[in-house]
Structures are given as C-alpha cells and as structure tokens.
Image (cartoon, rainbow, N blue to C red):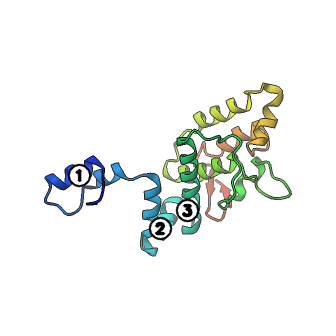
Amino acid sequence: MRKSNYLDIQTFEKSSEKVFPTIWLMVNILTFGQSIYMVKLMLPQSRRELSENFFHANVTQLISKLELLNLIRNICCHNGDLVDISLKTMPKVSGKYRQYLNMKNGNYPHRLAVVITVLLDLMYPLNDKYSFKHLERILNSLCEILGDDFANKSAQNMGFKNKESIHEMSSLFKNSKIITFYPDGSYIYK
C-alpha cells in the first residue's frame, strides 16, 4: 500500500492513523485481474466456499473462467476483435450448452460462444433475474451485419450452432423456477 501511486491511497496514508484502508477504498482501486489474484491467494477453504456457494463450481473451474473473462476484458480495453477470437486455452464448458454450440468432431468451438457460456454460468448464480436481452441483441446484430443470408454463417463463425441458438441459449435463464443447474453440468426441470 505504501508503494501505491493511486491518489486515493496516498491521501488515505497521509490523513489516517489506520493501518488498512476501508473496504470501499480497496474495492475502488482493485482491478479485475487483482481481484482474481486475491481469489488465488485465499485460504483453500475460503476459495472452496466462494466457488461452491456462489458459483456452483469447483475452485479450478472458477479461476479458469474468471481468467478467461479477464482476458476478454483486456482485449476489449485495447479495442481487440472479439467476433473472430480463437481461444488457445479453454475453460471447462458445461454440457448444457452442447446443443447451442457449433461443435466440430465432438469438440467445443474455441470462439466467442464459449466466452458467452462462461458469462452466463457466472452471472446466473449471482443474479437469476438478470436479463440477457441486451447481450442477445448485440450478438444478433453482429450476425446480421453481412445481411440475413449470412446470419447463420456469422453465428457459426462466433461458435454458435446458428443464429436461433443465441436466443435459445439465453432463454435457458428466463425462469429459475423451471430449470435447476448443477455444478457437473446436469440439470432438472421442476
């Protein structure tokens, strides 16, 4: 903290007798990457509790998914191309998405669609009322840039089975009382 060049931290250092800054100050200055690093540094029991109770995943899967989102965030910050992205390392993709993805020889696509599945998996446990309509509209507009004739081809290039699968995949999360997902990728209807 003493080596920090953040103005808020320097002001805190000069004006306070406290050893550690307040939580709001720490959250305000942490980057997403630093937050992931903090998760990695947590005690194993705390990491397990965080991953299982909030995200219904094991620790390794959670960290892998968070690191992927951090990579995507960094690509966006530097005006990178997400539509044509090809991932080298992949997080574990839940089997519930298999029917919506452009599978090749039984393998998941290393494309944007996998990033969307990670986003859905991490967002839904935190806020089951979150609307994915805005994200769905953006993905649909990306498919339609070249015209309706190429919409399915564009969706496949992003890793989706077709344009309609974008809607179907985001519709999985509309009513949390109907479907329940489990960490192993299985689900049941109620």
Secondary element at tag 1: helix
Looking at the rendering, in which quadrant would you find the N terminus? bottom left
Secondary element at tag 2: helix
- Going by the numbered disc 2, the residue's amino acid type is Lys
The numbered mark at residue 40 is 2
Residue at coordinates 61% horizontally, 55% vertically from top-left?
180
> Percent position (x, y) of residue 114?
68, 51
For the residues carrying marks 1 and 3, which lies nearer the camera in this image? 1
Q: Neighbour class for label 3 at 10 Å: few (<14), some, many (≥20)? A: many
Residue at image mark 3: 62
Q: Earlier in the sequence, mark 1 or mark 2?
A: 1
Residue at image mark 1: 10
**Quarter location, residue 151:** top right
Q: Residue furthest bottom?
A: 44
- Going by the numbered disc 1, the residue's amino acid type is Gln
* Residue 177 visible in the picture: no
Q: Neighbour class for label 2 at 10 Å: few (<14), some, many (≥20)? A: some
On screen, 59 above or below 32? below
Q: Neighbour class for label 1 at 10 Å: few (<14), some, many (≥20)? A: some
User: Disc 1 versus disc 2: distance between alpha carbons?
Assistant: 26 Å
Residue at coordinates 73% horizontally, 53% vertically from top-left?
110
* Residue 168 visible in the picture: yes
Residue at coordinates 61% horizontally, 63% vertically from top-left?
183
On screen, 52 above or below 168? below
User: Disc 1 versus disc 3: distance between alpha carbons?
Assistant: 33 Å
Residue at coordinates 55% horizontally, 50% vertically from top-left?
124
Q: Earlier in the sequence, mark 1 or mark 3?
A: 1
> Percent position (x, y) of residue 166?
71, 40
Q: Earlier in the sequence, mark 2 or mark 3?
A: 2
